């Protein structure tokens, strides 16, 4: 069956067409990145984002159908990111999807964007087994989840302040390196000595397992090797490499602790920052020969896309055939309904 996915939660408008059951594959996807529109501001401007979604969403949908050689009549399920995200941006996707679903009598399945990031790992890895731990590292989220099964989700740890991607973007912006900072810093990592400077791992005073990244941000912005530096100085390059080395070690250490406590069969790492080459290298090294199977989301599905939305939409449609997908979203599957494990895995 064919499923159309729509994603508009932040600064990418994406529409994807997937096939499930007969074959499991992504047939077509169109992603319109708004990076050039926001670059001059060094961050996403919500009003610009929603206006751009509004301008392109209809065209992208037509393009995807054309690319797949299908029409809207062939679509059995429409999957949509309902949240979390920027409200104006989400509303564009929601209004468009509701209209399309209503006019063509297609069931509408609303999915959670962060859970869709976890699902992205399944697109190229159908054999992932539960229970699993999933680390989602992106521009808006840094969360470790435990899933007993696909729709039984608990939060093990989440960031108390900034998300990791947000910190990478802000540090790069502060030093005038460009936007978005994550991929730019990724490329610069190899230019410096990752062991020259040290950064302390944040610790929660209440003993919680949550993340905190604001200390990293402050340390990077106030770093002596950054002050008045030329970004081509070796000391500056070493500082950037050391900073990345520490922040990725922090994320790895927290994930290892979650894995040790919960003993899952699989570990998924997903979200925009999971595209980072150092992070991928560190996780791969640590989990080679481990009893826990590591699944890194494929690079093209790490950052925001609609294939992951369609993939999860299908799973939800298949698992809960009798619910009213849209109305029940907020009651049954929103992030607010995740059970929080609280500090120390109690
Ligand atoms: O998942 P995503 O597209 O959007 C959110 O849901 O937030 O993630 C975007 C984030 C940005 O902060 C961006 O800088 C970061 O992912 N990112 C990277 C890399 N590619 C994207 N961070 C580090 N290394 C990368 N290669
Ligand atoms: Zn995302």
Image: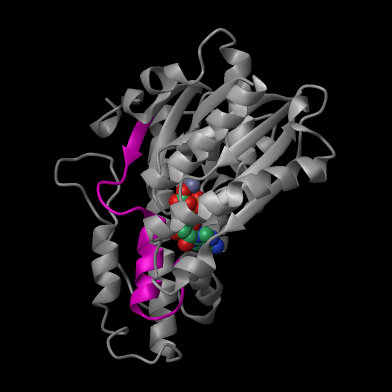
Residue 239 within the magenta-colored segment of the rendering: no
Tell me residue 323's x, y (percent): 51, 10
Residue 285 in the image: above or below residue 129: below
In the rendered structure, which segment of residues is drawn in magenta?
155-181
Q: Is residue 312 left or right of residue 142?
A: right
Residue 121 placement: quadrant: top right
Could you tell me which residue is drawn at 36 percent across and 25 percent down?
338
Which quarter shows the N terminus?
top right
Q: Residue furthest left?
A: 205
Seen in the picture, residue 98 relative to 190 is either above or below; the reply is: above
Residue 86 visible within the image: no
User: Image point 68% across, 41% down: which residue?
Assistant: 16
Q: Residue at x 38, y 74 (%)?
A: 173
Residue 304, x across and y down, in percent = 55, 49
Residue 127 or 301: which is nearer the viewer?
301
Locate residue 68, reporting x and y percent. 81, 40
């Amino acid at each position: 069956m064919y499923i159309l996915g729509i994603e508009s939660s932040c600064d990418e408008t994406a529409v994807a067409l997937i096939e499930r059951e007969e074959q499991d594959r992504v047939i077509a996807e169109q992603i319109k990145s708004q990076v050039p529109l926001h670059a001059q501001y060094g961050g996403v401007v919500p009003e610009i984002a929603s206006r751009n979604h509004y301008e392109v969403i209809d065209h992208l949908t037509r393009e995807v159908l054309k690319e797949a050689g299908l029409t809207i009549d062939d679509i059995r399920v429409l999957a949509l990111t309902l949240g979390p995200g920027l409200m104006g941006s989400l509303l564009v996707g929601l209004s468009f999807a509701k209209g399309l679903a209503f006019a063509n009598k297609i069931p509408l399945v609303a999915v959670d964007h962060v859970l869709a990031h976890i699902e992205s790992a399944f697109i190229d890895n159908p054999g992932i087994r539960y229970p699993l731990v999933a680390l989602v590292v992106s521009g808006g989220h840094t969360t470790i989840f435990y899933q007993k099964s696909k729709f039984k989700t608990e939060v093990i740890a989440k960031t108390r302040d900034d998300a990791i991607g947000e910190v990478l973007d802000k540090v790069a912006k502060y030093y005038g390196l460009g936007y978005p900072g994550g991929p730019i810093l990724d490329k610069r990592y190899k230019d410096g000595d990752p062991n020259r400077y040290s950064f302390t791992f944040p610790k929660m005073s209440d003993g919680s397992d949550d993340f905190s990244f604001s200390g990293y941000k402050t340390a990077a912005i106030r770093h002596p090797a950054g002050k008045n530096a030329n970004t081509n100085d070796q000391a500056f390059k070493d500082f950037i490499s050391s900073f990345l080395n520490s922040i990725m070690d922090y994320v790895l250490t927290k994930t290892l602790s979650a894995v040790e406590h919960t003993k899952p069969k699989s570990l998924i790492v997903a979200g925009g920052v999971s595209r980072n080459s150092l992070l991928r290298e560190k996780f791969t090294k640590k989990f080679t020969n481990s009893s826990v199977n590591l699944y890194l989301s494929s690079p093209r599905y790490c950052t925001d896309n609609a294939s992951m939305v369609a993939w999860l939409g299908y799973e939800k449609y298949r698992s809960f055939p009798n619910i009213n997908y849209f109305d029940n979203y907020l009651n049954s599957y929103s992030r607010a309904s995740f059970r929080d494990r609280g500090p120390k895995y109690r």
